[in-house]
Image: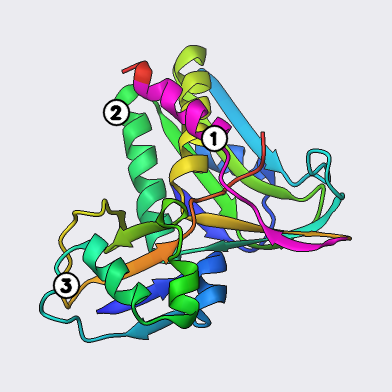
């Protein structure tokens, strides 16, 4: 699985991408976030408050119960703040 | 049509390229987003950097544009979004919609910019004299986009 990190999630984790081998018992977005959090350090800090973390699986926004598998591209980032401020 | 680029854009040239010579078009609406210095009471913004997720940006913008074409009778539409470092006064985003009649052009243009701000994967880091910070998402943007959901 390819993991991508953006904005302050990237800064806290300290890298913008990595390849991981997904453990067999991690089958959903929620389980993936818990597993990553368990790595501690920057991961634990970045994922401390999941209400400000958004996830995309294969470039589509994904809910916590969305299934994930080893070939997926999963991105973690803050809520989007695009465009100009009105 | 969608374009994500670092460079500035020329509004007149973009509108001409999109609609010039098209005799179906009776109305062209445009929205231009501009970087501003006002930080809502905080220290003035000296610059900001827009980060994005290229593969997802293209996909989300294409989906948003396809949705606008389903809802309104549009002849043509264009979204140009910049990324990278921008200073106050710099243009950030351009939305152009062209239709046979004004209502479709105006409504589709407002719809596109409202959705773009909540769906397109861009993140802003503002620089001020007091330091730099990531901008938090605004509930007001979500409400502006929700307006269109209610209208369905």
Residue B138 magenta-highlighted: yes
Task: Report how far apart the C-alphas of labels 1 and 3 lie in the structure.
Answer: 32 Å
Left or right for A66, reference A40: left
Q: Residues within 10 Å of mark 3 (few under 14, many from 20)?
A: some
Q: Which residues are magenta?
A: B130-149
Task: Report how far apart the C-alphas of labels 3 and 2 lie in the structure.
Answer: 38 Å
> Label 3: which residue?
A26
Q: Give the secondary structure at mark 2.
A: helix
**Residue B139, label in figure:** 1
Left or right for A36, reference A86: left
Q: Is residue A2 above or below residue B104?
A: below
Residue B49: image location, x then y, percent: 68, 62
Residue A12: image location, x then y, percent: 54, 75
Q: Is residue B147 above or below residue A8?
A: above
Q: Chain of mark 2?
A: B
Q: What residue appears at the point 29 percent right and 69 percent down from the top-left corner?
A: A34
Residue nearest the observer in this picture, A73 or A30: A30
- State if disc 2 and disc 1 touch (CB < 8 Å): no
Mark 3 or 2: in front is 3
């Amino acid at each position: 699985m390819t993991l991508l990190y953006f904005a302050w999630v990237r800064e806290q984790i300290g890298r913008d991408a990595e390849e991981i081998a997904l453990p067999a018992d991690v089958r959903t977005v929620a389980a993936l976030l818990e597993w990553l959090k368990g790595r501690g350090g920057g991961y634990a800090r970045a994922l401390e408050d999941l209400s400000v973390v958004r996830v995309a699986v294969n470039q589509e926004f994904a809910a916590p119960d969305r299934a994930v598998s080893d070939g997926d591209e999963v991105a973690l980032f803050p809520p989007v703040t695009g465009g100009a401020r009105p | 049509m969608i374009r994500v680029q670092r460079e500035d854009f020329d509004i007149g040239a973009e509108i001409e390229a999109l609609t010039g010579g098209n005799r179906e078009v009776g109305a062209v609406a445009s929205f231009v987003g501009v970087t501003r210095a006002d930080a809502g009471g905080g220290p003035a913004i000296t610059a900001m950097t827009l980060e994005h997720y290229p593969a997802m940006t293209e996909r989300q913008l294409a989906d948003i544009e396809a949705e606008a074409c389903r809802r309104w009778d549009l002849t043509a539409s264009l979204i140009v979004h910049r990324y990278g470092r921008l200073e106050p006064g710099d243009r950030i985003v351009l939305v152009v919609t062209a239709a046979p009649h004004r209502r479709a052009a105006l409504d589709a243009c407002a719809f596109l910019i409202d959705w773009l701000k909540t769906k397109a994967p861009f993140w802003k880091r503002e620089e001020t004299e007091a330091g730099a910070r990531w901008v938090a998402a605004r509930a007001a943007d979500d409400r502006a986009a929700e307006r269109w959901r209610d209208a369905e």
